[in-house]
Amino acid sequence: MKESFSEYINKLRTNKGLTLTKLAAALDLDQSTLSKIENGKRNVPIDILPKLAEVFDLDLKHLEHEYFSEKIAEIIYPQEEPAELLKAAEEKAKFLRIKNQHQGKINF
């Protein structure tokens, strides 16, 4: 995706011919909130992702990847070596995943 997540939502809505009012209702948002989201003036709430996937018949995992990749990009883009940060974050995520899996096991 070459656009922001907010722009993507706007594109999906307009391509499907939905008004702000109709999409807002489907997402359990008010029209002004959706307008602010589409204009990048308000963050996209994560809890609307399943509803977005349903309304636009999209794969939820793909939508989540796009959402989270943008959040990560927003954090690291000002840094001089974002690739190094991503590599370190990937290692940290692996460590945390393993640590949490081990904490969930009970040894007798």
Image (spheres, helix red, strand yellow):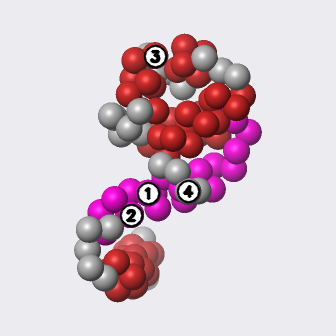
Which image quarter: residue 14? top right
Q: Is residue 76 left or right of residue 93?
A: left
Tag on residue 70?
1
Dot 1 amino acid type: Glu
Dot 3 amino acid type: Gln
Q: Is residue 93 left or right of residue 60?
A: left
> In terms of sequence position, does the residue under pointer 2 or pointer 4 come before the other?
4
* Of 83 and 59, the residue lying toward us: 83
Q: Position of residue 101 (x, y in %)?
A: 45, 75
* Of 3 and 90, the residue lying toward us: 3
Give the CA separation, mark 2 to mark 3. 28 Å
Mark 2 = which residue?
73
Binning the other alpha carbons within 10 Å of mark 4 as few (below 14), some (14 to 19) or many (20 upward) gives few
Callout 1 secondary element: helix
Q: Is residue 53 left or right of residue 24?
A: right
Which image quarter: residue 42? top left
- Discs 4/1, front: 4
Dot 4 amino acid type: Lys
Residue 60 among those drawn in magenta:
yes
The main secondary structure of the magenta stretch is: helix
> In terms of sequence position, does the residue under pointer 4 or pointer 1 come before the other?
4
Which image quarter: residue 96? bottom left
Mark 3 = which residue?
31
| Magenta residues (range) | 54-76
Visible in this render: residue 79? yes
Q: Position of residue 15 (x, y in %)?
A: 70, 32
